Amino acid sequence: MERHPPEFTIIRTIAQLKEIKACDFFAVEETRTANKLCSQGYLGVKMTSSLSGKVAFVTGGGSGIGEACSISLAKEGANVVVADRDLVGGQRVVNAIVGFGGKALALDLDVANDDAVEKAIADTVNKFGRLDIAVNNAGIGGDQAPTGDQSVAGWRKVLSINLDGVFYCMRHELGAMKKSGGGSIVNMASI
């Protein structure tokens, strides 16, 4: 039985990935990272090989749910690209993955920029030779104000990251996955 610290809520869902064994995705709500939980023995760091040879691309992978997905995929044996506009956070996650024997790459990425997304997918394929799994997790909440007080610029920023960003990612991910013989995409959203 797994131990979970009482101050954290751990949500586990099993994603059946096409032609890939099931992979646990952990969403950790709090400011501590999934890596810290792993180091404390709550999630464990034992690597398996269910995703060995697969390559995963995770947007927003430098913190929160994206970080937990990146670490979980790496624990299952996938090579992971941690794409985040916070390169320091992304590199921290990569260091954690490499620390337990995984392979990972941090990329600075603004998903609202189609050219940047295209380059990030190309960099992923150039580094690891393929793309099998994508977790489109990057997103923002926008202004914390009543609808009538929201700025149009703030609204456009939310849409450009949360909506356009997923489209840009899928557009380029699908092409890379087709060349690799297929793959799986997980799109995250919140309201």
Image (spheres, grey):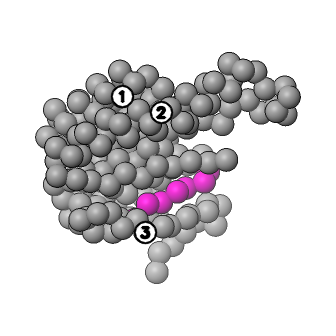
Question: What is the quadrant of residue 148 in the picture?
Answer: top right
Q: Which residue is mark 2?
A: 165
Mark 1 or 3: in front is 1
Instruction: Specify whether 91 is left or right of 85.
Output: left
Question: How many numbered circles are shown?
Answer: 3
Q: What secondary structure is marked by label 1?
A: helix
Q: What secondary structure is marked by label 2?
A: helix
Q: Which residue is mark 3?
A: 14
Tell me what residue is drawn at x 68 percent, y 23 percent.
Answer: 154
Tell me what residue is drawn at x 40 percent, y 24 percent.
Answer: 114
The amino acid beneath tag 2 is: Gly
The amino acid beneath tag 3 is: Ile
Q: What secondary structure is marked by label 3?
A: strand
Q: CA distance from mark 3 to mark 2?
A: 25 Å
Q: Magenta residues, as a range?
A: 24-30
Q: Which residue is mark 1?
A: 117
The amino acid beneath tag 1 is: Val
Which label's residue is closer to the chain start, 3 or 2?
A: 3
Predominant SS of the magenta segment? strand
Q: Position of residue 179 (x, y in %)?
A: 16, 43
